[in-house]
Amino acid sequence: MQRRAGPGAIPTVCAQYPRDIALIEGRVETTARVSCPEVARLLLLHDDAIELVEQPAVLPPRLVATQVVEPDPADPWHRYYDDVRGTALALLGLEEVPLVTRQFLVAYFAKEVDAFYGPGRAVNEAGLANAVRRMRDPEFVAALIEQASALELPESLATAVAHHLLAHVVHVSGGAWEMVRQAYLTYATDGDDSPVWLEDADGEQQLKVRPAAFRARYRERAEAWEAAADERIDRYFTNYLVNAWMRGYLDAPSVTAFVRSLVLQTAILRFLLFSDPELPSPPADGPAQPDVLEALDRAAVRSVYRMSRATEHDPGYLERLDRTLDELGFTSFAHLVALLRS
C-alpha cells in the first residue's frame, strides 16, 4: 500500500484476501490483489502506489504465505529470482521512456533470459549474469530503445494479433465476461455499415464484428484518450505491471510466458478501458476537464478489478487465450511486440 496510507488501508477483516504474502529469502513481502476494487483504486490512481515501504520481517497473525523462497535456495529458478525480477522492475521504472517501449525492453530481457534460465532445468549462470548485466547497462538499454523506436511492424500484423485475441474473448458470454461484449457494443451504430451488431442465431443473439471498421473506430477512440490523458493512462498500466511483477513469476513456465500473459492482460484492459460503456466520448481537442478525468479513473478501476476477478474465478482463461495465440501461429517475438502496439 502507499506509504501515506499504510497497511491499515486494508482493514483487518480482509486478513487473507486481498493481501498476498510471500516469504522471499527471509523477507516478508506484502502485495495486494487488484480484484478487490479498493485495492485497484489505491493502486491505479496514485503516483506513490508502487513505492516500496520497509516493514519488520514478521509474518502478520493469521496470514499464510502464498509463495516461499528459502534463504540461499538450491533451486536456480528461486536463486536468481531477485536478480531477474529486480531487473524487470528497474526497466519498468524508466519513467522518461514511453511505457510501450519499457514493455518492449522487459519482453526483450525475458527472451534473452529464457535461453539460460527456467524452472526445472540447469541454469547457465554466465549467460544469465551477462543478460542481467546488459539490461542494467544504460548505454545498451539506450541502444535498444533506439531500435524499438525505429521498429516498424506491418499494421496488418498488429491488427491480426489484436483481432484474433479479442474475437476469442467476445465469444465468452454471460457472467464476468459479459463486460467484454458490452464493451464491443459501444461501437455499434445505426445502419448497415455498423462495425458491431447483434444477430439472431440458434435462438440467441450473437455479436458480429467487421474487423477493419471496428479496428479503425477503436484506434480513433484510444488515440483520442491517449492524447487527452497520456500521463494518467501511463500511470494506470505502469502501476498494474509493477504490482504484477512484485507478486512475481515463480508459478509461470518461463519468464517469457509470464511477460506474454501480462501483455495479454494489458491488451484486454486497454480495450475495456477505452470501450467502457459508462465512459464519455474523449475530448475532441486539448486536455480533458476534471470531471472527464474522474470518469476515466472510474473506468480504469472498473476494468482492472472486474477483469482480475474474472480471471481469478476462471484461472484457465488466460491460458486458453495463450493457447489460441499458439494455434494461430502468433508465437514469435515480433508477434509479442505487435500485441504491445495494438
Image (cartoon, rainbow, N blue to C red):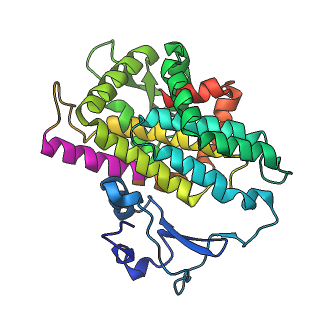
Q: Quadrant of residue 130?
A: top right
Residue farthest along the bottom direction in this orientation: 61
Q: Is residue 337 above or below residue 44?
A: above
Residue 260 in the image, given as x and y percentages of width and height: 61, 39
Numbered range of the magenta stretch: 289-304
Q: Is residue 5 above or below residue 169?
A: below
Quarter of the rendering occupied by the N terminus: bottom left
Name the residue rendered at 42%, 51% in the picture. Answer: 239
Name the residue rendered at 29%, 43% in the picture. Answer: 232
Residue 97 in the image, given as x and y percentages of width and height: 42, 36
> Taking 267 as reference, is 321 left or right?
right
> Taking 6 as reference, is 124 left or right?
right
Which one is in front, 29 or 182? Answer: 29
Which one is in front, 229 or 54? Answer: 54
Q: Is residue 67 above or below residue 210?
A: below
Which one is in front, 128 or 206? Answer: 128
How many labels, in total? 0
Name the residue rendered at 20%, 36% in the picture. Answer: 280
> Taking 151 as reference, is 10 left or right?
left
Find out whether residue 111 is within the magenta segment: no
Which secondary structure type mostly characterizes the magenta part of the structure?
A: helix
Q: Is residue 71 visible?
A: yes
Name the residue rendered at 43%, 41% in the picture. Answer: 269
Q: Is residue 315 visible?
A: no
Residue farthest along the right direction in this orientation: 122
Q: Is residue 4 above or below residue 340?
A: below
Residue 93 in the image, given as x and y percentages of width and height: 46, 47
Which one is in front, 132 or 281? Answer: 132
Q: Quadrant of residue 264?
A: top right
Residue 315 in the image, given as x and y percentages of width and height: 60, 53
